[in-house]
Image: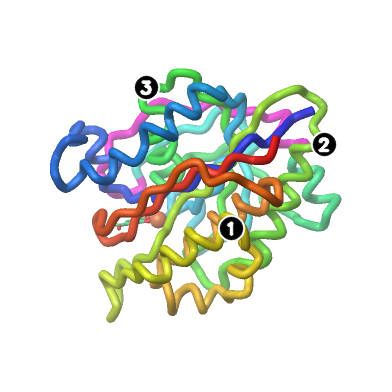
Amino acid sequence: MAKIIGGLTTSHIPAIGGAIARETFEDPYWKPFFDGYPPVRDWLQEKKPDVAIVIYNDHGLNFFLDKMPAFAIGAAPEYRNRDEGWGIPTIPPFPGDPALSWHIIESLSAEEFDLCTCQEMAVDHGFCVPMQLFWPDRKNMPRTIPVAVNTVQHPIPQPARCYKMGQAIGRAVASWPEDIKVVVLGTGGMSHQLDGERAGFINKTFDLMCMDKIVDSPEELTKFSSLDLVREAGAQGTEFIMWLMMRGALSETVTLKHKNYHIPISNTGSGLMLLECAA
Ligand code: DHB
Ligand code: FE
């Protein structure tokens, strides 16, 4: 049977894509950020997951204000990267796993989660930057299944709903008969606000509280509404719902293998976590 072996979270700030392209890993601004990743890369090279379910938010590349699904999932053989306007160099496509995608779609539908299914899907920095951070040279890079959650146009899904959908994704994977290893990525966050009166807002206390609670008591975090997240973490800090969906997919008990938090990268409190599932 398929098994979820762990969960990874990381911020997905576009400036990281630029820094990767320029290879400014040792630059004093970037070093404390990039130095967080080698332990996670080592874990991935040791475990060699077959599939990565990448929960992220599309930033206007696939879906725009005219058509905005709450939840969308890829069911394509590959996912192409396009620049949605940040000027980051584009990178080669990512392989998909349509059979497992359709199994997850059917399993979620049976549990009354109805998703927008995408047999073609372009992926933006929310997907690509984390993939580049975790598999920098693509060695042993898994097949991917993108799951996009709306954080662009309110009303956005509630944190509790995202957590429950994560749990349903966990059950879907557990009922897939192939013997494969799956990791779940939740990208985005942490606190940031890119525009308006509070542009530049970061809330370190809230971010660190979330990184603490998500390990052993994620359900406490599902008590926040999406508007609570706007208030506490900034308008774009709502991206934390991706972390909650990721956490829902994991086993109830997880081991915190690694974490890093660094302020600021661009306008954002950047966080990284590796949670390993119970054997
Ligand atoms: C930034 C952060 C994001 O999550 C994003 O999608 C775009 C920009 C930033 O801090 O610059
Ligand atoms: Fe973002």
214 left or right, relative to 139: right
Residue 158 seen in this snapshot:
no
Q: In whole angstroms, how far apart are the C-alphas of marks 3 and 1? A: 28 Å
Q: Given the current orientation, which residue lies at the most extreme top position?
A: 139
Q: Tell me the residue that label 2 is attached to.
A: 175
Ligand 1: image quarter: bottom left
Element type at mark 2: loop
Q: Which residues are magenta?
A: 84-103
76 left or right, relative to 197: right
Three-letter residue code for mark 2: Ser
**Horizontal and vertical percent for residue 122?**
48, 39
The label number, if any, that marks residue 169 in the structure image: none
Which residue is located at x 54 percent, y 55 percent? 242
108 left or right, relative to 141: right
Along the line of sight, the residue nearer the viewer: 89 or 202: 202
Which residue is located at x 66 percent, y 28 percent? 181
Q: Tell me the residue that label 3 is attached to.
A: 137
Query: Does the residue at mark 2 contact the one at mark 3 (Cβ under 8 Å)?
Result: no
Q: Is residue 214 above or below residue 196?
A: above
Three-letter residue code for mark 3: Asp
Q: Residues within 10 Å of mark 2 (few under 14, many from 20)?
A: some
Displayed quadrant of residue 264: bottom left
Q: Residues within 10 Å of mark 1 (few under 14, many from 20)?
A: many
Q: Given the current orientation, which residue lies at the most extreme left position?
A: 28
Element type at mark 3: loop
Q: Tell me the residue that label 1 is attached to.
A: 244
